[in-house]
Image (tube, helix red, strand yellow):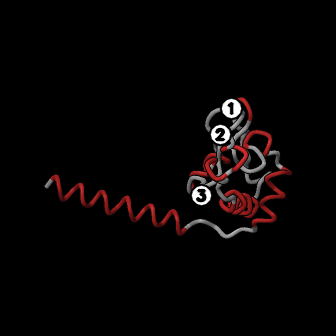
């Protein structure tokens, strides 16, 4: 019985994870970048989502958390992050910002940067 319940729970969680991923909205990367700057997201999260100085804001790129969590944090933030209700950041704007953040590639590995490997 216990194994059966664990299997059902695992199946349910995987299904939910796939639904969350499938629910990622389509947005404009270029518009999202403009909105990321306009709404001053960069001041805490850095221009490439790398995180702010002195822990002003956490790293959000590359590989941001799922859209549902991203939206929840923007609409009902934990901690000191300001709230961005739909009156100020529309659902489409939010989708665009997420598309921009999700498009940010990982930086190069330090071992591939010649200047860092001189010594």
Spatial separation of the CA atoms under disc 1 and disc 2: 7 Å
Residue in view at x 77 percent, y 54 percent: 89
Spatial separation of the CA atoms under disc 3 and disc 1: 23 Å
Rendering coords of residue 6 (x, y %): 24, 55
- Left/right placement of residue 6 relative to residue 52 reads left
**Residue 116 visible in rendering:** yes
Q: Nearer the viewer, mark 2 or mark 3?
A: 2
Are the residues at dot 1 and dot 2 in contact (C-beta closer than 8 Å)? yes
- Left/right placement of residue 49 relative to residue 43 reads left
Residue in view at x 72 percent, y 43 percent: 45
> Could you tell me which secondary element the residue under label 3 belongs to?
helix
Foreground of the two, 93 or 46? 46
The quarter of the rendered structure image containing the C terminus is top right
Foreground of the two, 6 or 46? 46
> Could you tell me which secondary element the residue under label 1 belongs to?
helix
Rendering coords of residue 9 (x, y %): 30, 57
Location of mark 3 (residue): 67
Mark earlier in primary sequence (2, 3): 2
Location of mark 2 (residue): 58
Counting other residues with Cα less than 10 Å from the Cα at mark 2, is it few (<14), some (14-19), or many (20 or more)? some
Spatial separation of the CA atoms under disc 2 and disc 3: 16 Å
Location of mark 1 (residue): 55
> Could you tell me which secondary element the residue under label 2 belongs to?
loop
């Amino acid at each position: 019985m216990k194994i059966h319940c664990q299997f059902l729970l695992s199946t349910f969680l995987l299904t939910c994870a796939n639904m969350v991923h499938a629910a990622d909205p389509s947005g404009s990367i270029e518009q999202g970048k403009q909105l990321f700057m306009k709404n001053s997201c960069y001041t805490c999260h850095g221009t490439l989502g790398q995180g702010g100085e002195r822990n002003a804001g956490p790293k959000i790129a590359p590989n941001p958390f799922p859209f549902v969590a991203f939206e929840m944090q923007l609409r009902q933030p934990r901690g000191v992050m300001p709230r961005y209700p739909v009156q100020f950041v529309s659902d489409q704007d939010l989708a665009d910002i997420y598309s921009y953040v999700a498009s940010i590639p990982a930086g190069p590995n330090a071992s591939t940067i010649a200047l860092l490997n001189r010594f």
